[in-house]
């Protein structure tokens, strides 16, 4: 950072190998081609300014740009039906099964919607797929469905960041689940191998508000 304008909240950023200079206003993001090959290599976001302390978010986006992808895209390869979500830092994150996918999206495979947005699953080349960094498994969307693993009757509410809160005990007592979600609550069954994608929080009680 070569210049900080605290009044207008603007900064000047110099990116090197061969220096590339970009000016950014607070909240603005710029994409930069560092090596002159016509493909943007990094994005730089002027995220915050506290006094003269500048918070920049710099991300490697070359793999995304090369593949013609953007954050939020759904992708697969021609040889595999597995679907991945491309996150904000360009990683591919696997939907481990179809039931998990449909907690995040509505519609059908021929008409996928996310809120008011229509989504398609893009088929990418194996080379472009391999160039994307591997992320993590996508977990069930919080506050959509209760889940259980096939190795136990314990049933959980999914809360933000993949934290599980027990609502049905190991001996099958579902008093809390019925109190919070009614007698017709729905449970998704998840393969045992994906249990480590989640973390366990404290059990819920019948007197708390169902988490959202």
Image (tube, helix red, strand yellow):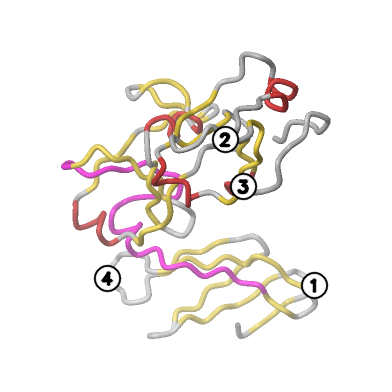
**Viewed as shown, does residue 176 lie left or right of 134?**
right
Q: Are marks 2 and 3 in contact (CB under 8 Å)?
A: no
Name, please, the residue furthest toward the left.
79
Q: Decide: is 115 above or below 66.
A: above
Give the secondary structure at mark 4.
Answer: loop
Q: Quadrant of residue 142?
A: top right
- The residue singled out by tag 4 in the image is 37
112 part of magenta stretch:
no
Distance of mark 3 from mark 1, alpha carbons?
42 Å
Q: Tell me the magenta residue range.
A: 55-79
Q: Residues within 10 Å of mark 2 (few under 14, many from 20)?
A: some
What residue would you read off at disc 3? 163
Mark 2 vs mark 4, CA separation in Å: 54 Å
Task: Give the number of the disc on residue 67.
Answer: none
Q: Earlier in the sequence, mark 2 or mark 3?
A: 2
Sequence-first disc among 3 and 1: 1
Q: Is residue 113 above or below residue 192?
A: above
Q: Look at the numbered disc 3 and give the secondary structure of its residue.
A: strand
Query: Residues at badges 3 and 1 in contact (C-beta under 8 Å)?
Result: no
Judged from this view, the residue extending furthest toward the front is 171
Quadrant of the frame with the C terminus: top right
Q: Which residue is under mark 2?
A: 154
């Amino acid at each position: 950072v070569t210049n900080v304008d605290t009044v207008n909240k603007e900064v000047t950023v110099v990116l090197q190998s061969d220096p590339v200079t970009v000016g950014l206003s607070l909240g603005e993001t710029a994409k930069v081609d560092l090596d002159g090959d016509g493909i943007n290599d990094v994005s730089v976001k002027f995220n915050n300014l506290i006094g003269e302390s500048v918070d920049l978010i710099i991300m490697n986006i070359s793999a995304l740009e090369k593949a013609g992808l953007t954050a939020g895209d759904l992708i697969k390869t021609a040889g595999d039906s597995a679907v991945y979500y491309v996150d904000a830092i360009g990683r591919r994150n696997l939907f481990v099964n179809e039931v998990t996918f449909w907690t995040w999206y509505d519609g059908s495979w021929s008409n996928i919607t996310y809120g008011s947005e229509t989504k398609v699953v893009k088929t990418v080349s194996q080379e472009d797929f391999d160039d994307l960094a591997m992320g993590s498994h996508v977990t069930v969307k919080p506050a959509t469905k209760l889940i259980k693993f096939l190795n136990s009757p314990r049933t959980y509410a999914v809360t933000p960041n993949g934290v599980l809160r027990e609502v049905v005990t190991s001996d099958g007592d579902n008093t809390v689940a019925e109190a919070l979600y009614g007698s017709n609550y729905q449970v998704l069954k998840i393969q045992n191998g994906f249990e480590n994608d989640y973390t366990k929080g404290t059990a819920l009680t019948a007197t708390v508000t169902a988490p959202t």
